[in-house]
Image (spheres, grey):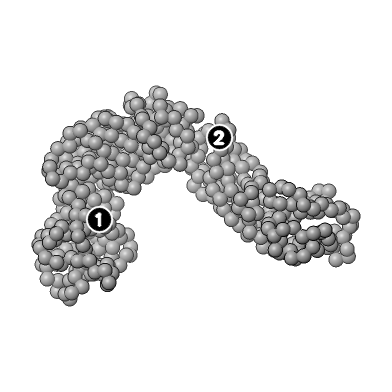
């Protein structure tokens, strides 16, 4: 549901359930036009107040056009849809999405908002259903946004929506002309290396498509436009490597097209192609790189899970695509600050298919600890892809007392006759205690006597034998 507000808004009650908007009005509602709304069917609704003028649209059909104070802001009683002062005029139904504006939106903005909602929820508008790339067989219905003009007083010429793409500055936007786009929800990674033209090594899996039409669906030309892409968190970008691909012959392929070059950096990881005139009605476009080594738009991590199994810690992760990925490293920490390497595992280097990875830490810390995944490119560049915590339950072999409050520590071991090396150090690696023990007592416990208790903090206790090592986080209070 889209809602525009001038000075104030107050509407009756609503609940959020299911995934679409349902208008279901009481038979006693005073507005016969509202009563004509089909009940138990999903709709796109817009309610606007500008001064004393009140308008409401159902699927872009104007059903209320009046003046008065039917909409007001009830600060003390909360937000509501409908009238709280007259029985039978409150909203009854389900709302999937509510959009509030602090100003009265113009007609061009309202039409674009309605097309966004209609595409997202699979609905058909009564009029101005100008975006058709969400229809069956197309399905470019994700993060729809657009620019357009109804007349000289109703213009919207700069839009981004919730995606990384912003389009603005049309040079020839006339009356009753719209330029609306959405994408296929493909991956924001340059993982397609087959459907690319000469001069391009890889392109995004995400593809956008445009409806450039009038209210009747006739193709129009809004002139050239500027395209801006926010590439934050997508790795190193060399501006000259970026290419814009447009499917100008509308055959669904990019391999037979000529890349558009000339990208510029606007700062803050925003990159722009200005004065683009190649994109027309129904055309697809996407972003690509001409050098996958310099501008990889890299590893796409789809999952990272850490869990315990028989006192071991298992780290599992999966990638949907990888670009120039040399290897992964699993690191652990007792405090979430100082990390040490557990082990490394080779990556797939370049791949467009899913890969699953598993690495087991057979000597984890006891209690709460932290694991993170580091990825290293073929050129040595590194990136941390995720951090997880895990708790290994205390077992019979855990040293005690823990937390340590004195200078005496008891360490259970597996054998009476083995020789042991016991060390206590800081998480960063500074050793504070080292002791050698020829054997344990009859209860298989080493009695460790410290000359002085360490300052309060978190330490690492390690017990070595000839063929194994036991590690435990030790807390000193």
Q: Which mark is residue 371?
A: none
- What quarter of the picture does the N terminus occupy? bottom left
Q: Residue furthest bottom?
A: 87
Helix, strand or loop status at disc 2 = loop
Percent coordinates x, y for residue 202 in the rendering:
43, 31
Position of 168 relative to 67 (above/below)? above
**Nearer to me, 313 or 154:** 154
Percent coordinates x, y for residue 36 in the rendering:
13, 64
- Real-space CA distance between mark 2 and mark 1, rounded to the nearest whole angstrom: 44 Å
Position of 466 relative to 261 (above/below)? below
Helix, strand or loop status at disc 1 = strand
Q: In this view, does 204 lie to the left or right of 385?
A: left
- Which sits earlier in the primary sequence, circle 2 or circle 1? 1
**Nearer to me, 49 or 161:** 49
Q: Residue 101 carries which label?
A: 1
**Nearer to me, 64 or 275:** 275
Mark 2 neighbour density, 10 Å: few (under 14) some (14–19) many (20 or more):
few
Q: Residue 381 carries which label?
A: 2
Percent coordinates x, y for residue 254 in the rendering:
35, 30
Q: Which of marks 2 and 1 is in front?
A: 1
Query: What residue is rendered at 45% in x and 39% in y?
Result: 234
Q: Would residue 418 be visible to someone looking at this image? A: no
Q: In which quarter of the image is residue 454?
A: bottom right
- What quarter of the picture does the C terminus occupy? bottom right
Q: Would residue 71 be visible to someone looking at this image? A: yes
């Amino acid at each position: 549901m889209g809602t525009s507000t001038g000075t104030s808004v107050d509407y009756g009650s609503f609940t959020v359930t299911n995934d679409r908007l349902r208008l279901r009005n009481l038979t006693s509602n005073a507005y016969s036009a509202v009563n004509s709304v089909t009940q138990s069917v999903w709709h796109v609704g817009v309610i606007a107040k500008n001064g004393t003028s009140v308008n409401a649209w159902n699927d872009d059909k104007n059903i209320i056009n009046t003046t008065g104070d039917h909409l007001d802001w009830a600060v003390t009683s909360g937000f509501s849809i409908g009238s709280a002062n007259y029985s039978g005029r409150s909203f009854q139904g389900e709302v999937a999405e509510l959009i509030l504006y602090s100003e009265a939106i113009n007609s061009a903005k309202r039409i674009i908002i309605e097309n966004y909602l209609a595409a997202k929820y699979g609905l058909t508008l009564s009029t101005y259903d100008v975006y058709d790339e969400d229809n069956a067989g197309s399905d470019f219905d994700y993060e729809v946004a657009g620019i357009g003009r109804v007349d000289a007083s109703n213009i919207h010429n700069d839009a981004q929506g919730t995606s990384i793409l912003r389009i603005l500055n049309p040079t020839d936007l006339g009356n009753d002309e719209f330029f609306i786009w959405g994408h296929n929800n493909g991956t924001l990674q340059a993982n397609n290396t087959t459907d690319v033209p000469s001069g391009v090594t890889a392109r995004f899996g995400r593809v956008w498509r445009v409806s450039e039409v009038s209210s009747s669906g006739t193709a129009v030309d809004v002139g050239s436009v500027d395209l801006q892409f926010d590439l934050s968190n997508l790795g190193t970008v060399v501006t000259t490597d970026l290419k814009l691909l447009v499917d100008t012959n509308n055959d669904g392929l990019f391999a037979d097209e000529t890349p558009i070059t000339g990208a510029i950096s606007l700062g803050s990881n925003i990159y722009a192609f200005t004065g683009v005139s190649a994109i027309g009605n129904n055309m697809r476009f996407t972003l690509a790189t001409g050098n996958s080594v310099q501008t990889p738009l890299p590893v796409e991590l789809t999952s990272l899970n850490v869990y315990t199994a028989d006192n071991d810690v298992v780290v599992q992760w999966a990638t949907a695509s990888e670009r120039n990925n040399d290897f992964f490293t699993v690191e652990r920490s007792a405090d979430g600050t100082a990390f040490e390497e557990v082990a490394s595992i080779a990556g797939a280097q370049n791949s467009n298919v899913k890969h699953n990875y598993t690495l087991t830490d057979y000597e984890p810390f006891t209690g709460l600890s932290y694991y993170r995944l580091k990825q290293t490119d073929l050129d040595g560049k590194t990136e941390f892809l995720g951090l997880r915590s895990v708790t290994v339950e205390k077992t019979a072999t855990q040293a005690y007392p823990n937390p340590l409050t004195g200078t005496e520590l008891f360490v259970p071991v597996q054998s009476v006759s083995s020789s042991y090396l016991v060390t206590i150090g800081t998480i960063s690696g500074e050793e504070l205690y080292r002791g050698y023990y020829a054997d344990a007592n009859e209860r298989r416990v080493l009695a460790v006597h410290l000359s002085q208790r360490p300052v309060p903090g978190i330490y690492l206790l390690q017990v070595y034998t000839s063929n194994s090592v036991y590690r435990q986080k030790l807390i000193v209070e």
